[in-house]
Amino acid sequence: MFSKVLIANRGEIAVRVIRACRELGIKTVAVYSELDREALHVRLADEAYALGGQTAAESYLNTAAILDAITRSGAEAVHPGYGFFSENADFARAITEMGVAFIGPPPAAIEIMGDKISARKAAEAAGVFGVPGTTEFITSPDDVVAFGAEHGYPIAIKAAYGGGGRGMKVVLDEAAIAECIESAQREAKNYFGRDEIYMERYLKKPRHVEVQLLADQHGNCIYLGTRDCSAQRRHQKLIEEAPAADIDPATLAAMGEAAVKVAKGCGYVNAGTAEFLYEDGGFFFLEMNTRLQVEHPATELVTFIDLVEMQLRVAFGEVLPLTQDQVTVTGHAIEIRINAEDPAGGKFLPSPGKITKLRPAAGFGVRWDGGYEAGDEISQYYDNLVGKLIVWGKDRPTAIARAIRALEETEIEGVATTIPADLAILRHPDFAAFTHSTKWVEDVLDLSGVSAAAGAAPAPTEEDTTPKIRRDTVVEVNGKRFSVSMWVPESAGVVMAGGSSGAPRAKRSGGSGGGGGAASGEVAAPMQGTIIKVLVAVGDAVEAGQAVCVLEAMKMENNVTADKAGTVKEVRVAPGDTVGSGDIVVVIE
């Protein structure tokens, strides 16, 4: 087995991989951005190396910096986690060319399946067919116009190199085509480093069902049951279940066999997931995620198989320890993604900030996979997943009841979370009856009365301001992280390599305040983020509810809208500006 593995990721998935490695006696190496100097994954790893920068592009998508950390650490293998470089064939090839194992599929398989268009072609070659769509990249709005004329609307525009709903936009009519193309490309570029897009017909009430695959280097490939991921918002999953319920077992078996055909057809190795859309008794191949999925723990709880351990063993060259006939699924598992978002009114607005309290649930059949602890900061620059609550029950009703109990028991303060929305979903009769679809949360679920207050930060105590010995203070020497103990007055701070300070930084002012009263004309940023696009100019006439700018926070784009009709008097921001919650961006009179 490998002696040292570098995890080219952050947050919850980096912590998950570190723990699996530790159980196997494998040393771990973390990498981190300026904002993640003291993140949980950095604290848990045996070694850690600075990547520099704040944004993903400056740090976790900085190929040269990660390759340098691999060389300096002497890591024998790299686990990419999910997101970032996990589905990037060029990155996987650069790793393998160094003589270092990539804990994922071969670069050729990533190229085939990581590109959603070539994945469609490969699936069709294996006799597995998808939703009607294109097998070429979109090059202009005219491509979408022609597709709409043939297939009608709505149309789904998707990132060709990505997943998880990032870079996906739904075109409702011809007038929205140009804007959706621009937004999809921008999101795809920010999250995956590539902006190629394609399109397909958007089904009206599908269920999202996926098949967990595991393949070794010796030609063996099995599927580990199914998952249903239909409870979504913004095309991103909120709640996942294993196995997919209320579908004929013969249909589920056919999905599993189809997934294996697709995987074998592209020479796939390691863990992967084939995704399908299910509607009216039939299913369509959607895409294949050439990585470990966020929702993999749900499969682990019903199969008793540690997927990260299997990834490590397969990458090392071991043969799969079981055959398809030996795969069993026991009971039912539900995974709830708890995100730093305020679901009030169904808006799901990102809520970056410091976690002042974090107490996850416990008890029989309850698991918590998290990337943060109390005192940690959730940055606007990264994904907003706080952690995942996963429960197991002997059947689906038991799992639902246990999930509700566990969510009620979980305490998170300092940031707003999706917990109130998760509870609303789990308690709804549509969810219990399994009549919901991928559009149900946004089209049917009533979240008008939901509130997700962030909670107040505790007041500083005398102990917080008293000079003391700082143990395990973080310093960097030539980019490598070390922990030392030293006496430092609180007022002095600790100067880190690169000029940053260990003392708390002053928070920026909220600008002109909390956005004024109702229909004040002072349009405020609803959360901290970066202005991506300004849509109005001084003198423009606007209507109430019209978007005046686009704000990116936590890898999601959000329209900031006018609170009343009138004429634009001031525009206080420009593309690239960073704003805080409550900062005034546009004034209308």
Image: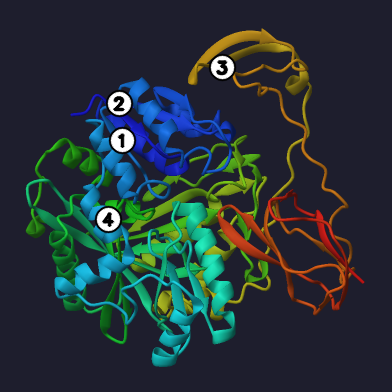
Q: Which residue is mark 4?
A: 111
Mark 2 secondary-structure assignment:
loop
Q: Residue 57, relative to residue 53: is it above or below?
A: below
The dot on residue 75 is 2
The dot on residue 78 is 1
Instruction: Give the farthest residue toward the right.
Output: 589
Mark 4 secondary-structure assignment:
helix
For residue 40, say whether it is visible: yes
**Label 3 with label 2: CB-CB less than 8 Å:** no
Distance from label 1 to label 2 (Cα)? Answer: 7 Å
Q: Nearer the viewer, mark 1 or mark 4?
A: 4
In the drawing, does residue 63 fall left or right of residue 247?
right
Q: Residue 296, relative to residue 197: is it above or below?
A: above
Q: Amino acid under label 4?
A: Glu
- Residue occupying image coordinates x 54% and y 11%: 484
- Residue occupying image coordinates x 83% and y 43%: 509
Distance from label 4 to label 2 (Cα)? Answer: 25 Å
- Please state, as top left, top right, bottom left or bottom right, where the C terminus lies in the image: bottom right
Tell me which numbered mark, 3 or 2, is placed earlier along the sequence. Answer: 2
**Looking at the rendering, which quadrant does residue 520 occupy?**
bottom right
Instruction: Give the farthest residue toward the top.
Output: 487
Tell me which numbered mark, 1 or 4, is placed earlier along the sequence. Answer: 1
Q: Nearer the viewer, mark 4 or mark 3?
A: 4
**Label 1 with label 2: CB-CB less than 8 Å:** yes
